[in-house]
Image (tube, grey):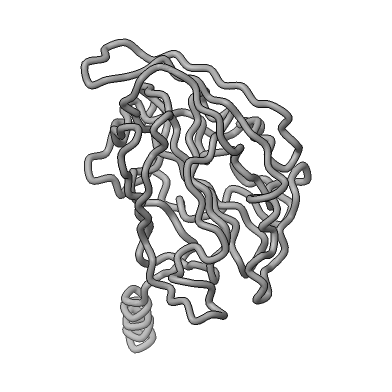
Amino acid sequence: MLDMQLHMFTLIAVLATIPVFGHMEMTSPCPRYSPKCATPSALPPGAVLDYNLNGPIGGNGNINQPFCKYTKPWPQVSDTWTTGHPVTISFANNGASHSGGHTEFSISYDNANTFVVVHQVLRHMFFTAPPPSGGSDTVRSYTFTLPMGLPGTSHAIFAWTWVNAIGNREFYMNCADVAIIGNAGSYTGKAMTVANYGPMYPTIPEFMGNYNTGIQLYSTNISQVTVTGSGYSNSSTSTTETTSSSTNTPLYTAVSVPPSSGWF
């Protein structure tokens, strides 16, 4: 019996040293309810830290969680950005990249009812190039410039969305609460693409080496949305009220918030 217990303890110790590779998650700006924030905000009442932020919010025709995983924002923003300036988005080093796929970075001014895209990484997310072309799985951060015409707000939702190239047909989404320094105004851009998320949205099949799979949902069959913000600066003290509107939004890019019963 003692030998068996020692064997079990040894096995557990060995397993504990093996890294666990989940899916993928954004690490900066710090997403909602992440336990990995450098300076974590206080959680909303009743909320708990999420140690599974790398899981998809939908897949295989199912909806697992609402957009952003959680509908209650951090009480304080994770970061403050400025329109027309570069921002860097970082991801977990030990995540599973599923041979790349399509990603969009989007911003909502109306509590996740409408998302406008501010940057895309199509075909080979996390890779230097599509894997069939010799791309290496080494990219874990992306830097891009926020559009100059993006309006300012004291509290926006920044979203990373990803459709993986191989594996179960899944839709990933992490969201961070950010402030954006900029003038009052409106901005029109592409609506966020949603796929592999319940029966109302299209399914993008496995790429199977064809990295143009589903690309039309991101670059051809698209719609425009307009977001509006009342402006924000470092000296702003009042909460920015914002509204958004969409025009001619087809089903595959509609981004109305799904029911949140049972989630924060």
Residue at 42 percent of width and 29 percent of height:
149
Residue at 35 percent of width and 54 percent of height:
90
Q: Nearer the viewer, residue 108 or 78?
A: 108
Residue 195 pos. (x, y %): 68, 50
Q: Is residue 258 shown above or below 121?
A: above
Residue at 69 percent of width and 58 percent of height:
214
Q: Nearer the viewer, residue 257 or 263?
A: 257
Is residue 146 visible from the viewing direction of this image?
Answer: yes
Residue 220 pos. (x, y %): 69, 49
Q: Residue furthest top?
A: 238
Is residue 48 visible from the viewing direction of this image?
Answer: no
Residue at 55 percent of width and 29 percent of height:
188
Residue 178 pos. (x, y %): 36, 32
The mark total stands at 0
Residue 48 pos. (x, y %): 40, 38
Q: Nearer the viewer, residue 138 or 93?
A: 138
Q: Is residue 243 shown above or below 160?
A: above
Quadrant in which the N terminus appears? bottom left
- Is 16 on the left-hand or right-hand side of 159? left
- Is 42 on the left-hand or right-hand side of 167? left
Q: Is residue 108 shown above or below 170?
A: above
Q: Is residue 7 shown above or below 230?
A: below
Q: Residue furthest right?
A: 199
- Is 28 on the left-hand or right-hand side of 133? left
